[in-house]
């Protein structure tokens, strides 16, 4: 029985690692919640139109792709990208998940950036902010601090 549990945990950990690998952005909501619970970190969710939304592309270029943001995120956040592309291919499962989450959280425009707890409850909502990665990190820290009060 112990071996079965250990094997199951190993498979789960590998799945989470794959889902959150690469540039640090995952696309699986359940894997992000599991990682957030395990690491005791909030989830930063980016509702984006990565291949058509000008403000989304600007946010990625000015903030999310920068070392300062990546360093902060690596230590403090679980990153989840919920993409609504026009050209990029996605699995049916991901499309359905993203649509359902968009409806659940009442997303009306892109980019919408949410901070969620490990249970998937909304802590804060924001979007594009001018000023680059340092200012954005401070903005996120402020939102998280305000939510803790």
Image (cartoon, grey):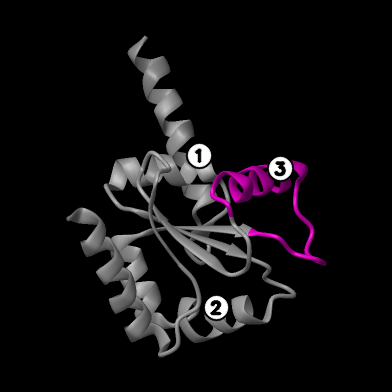
Residue at image point 61% right, 75% down: 56
Task: Estimate how packed mark 3 is, as few (under 14), some (14 to 19) or many (20 or more) residues with alpha carbons within 10 Å.
Answer: few
Query: Observer-nearest residue: 43 or 146?
Result: 146
Residue that sits furthest to the top in the current view: 1
Q: Secondary structure at mark 3?
A: helix
Q: Which residue is mark 1?
A: 30
The answer to if 88 sits in the magenta stretch is yes
| Disc 2: CA contacts within 10 A as few (<14), some (14-19) or many (>=20) | some
Q: Is residue 61 left or right of residue 141?
A: right
Residue identified by numbered label 3: 96
In this image, 8 relative to 19: left or right? Answer: left
Nearest to N terminus: mark 3 or mark 2: 2
Task: Decide which of tag 1 and tag 3 comes sooner along the chain.
Answer: 1
- The magenta span reads 83-106
For discs 1 and 3, the disc positioned in front in the rendered view: 3
Residue highlighted by disc 2: 60
Q: In the picture provided, is 131 more to the left or to the right than 112?
A: left
């Amino acid at each position: 029985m112990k071996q079965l549990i250990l094997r199951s945990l190993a498979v789960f950990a590998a799945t989470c690692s794959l889902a959150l690998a690469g540039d640090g952005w995952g696309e699986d909501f359940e894997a992000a919640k599991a990682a957030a619970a395990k690491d005791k970190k909030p989830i930063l969710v980016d509702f984006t139109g990565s291949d058509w939304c000008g403000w989304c592309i600007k946010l990625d270029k000015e903030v999310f792709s920068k070392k300062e943001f990546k360093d902060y995120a690596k230590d403090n956040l679980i990153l989840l990208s919920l993409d609504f592309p026009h050209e990029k291919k996605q699995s049916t499962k991901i499309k359905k998940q993203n649509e359902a989450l968009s409806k659940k959280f009442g997303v009306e425009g892109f980019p919408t950036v949410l901070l969620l707890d490990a249970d998937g409850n909304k802590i804060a909502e924001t979007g594009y902010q001018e000023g680059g990665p340092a200012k954005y990190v401070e903005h996120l820290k402020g939102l998280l601090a305000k939510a803790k009060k």
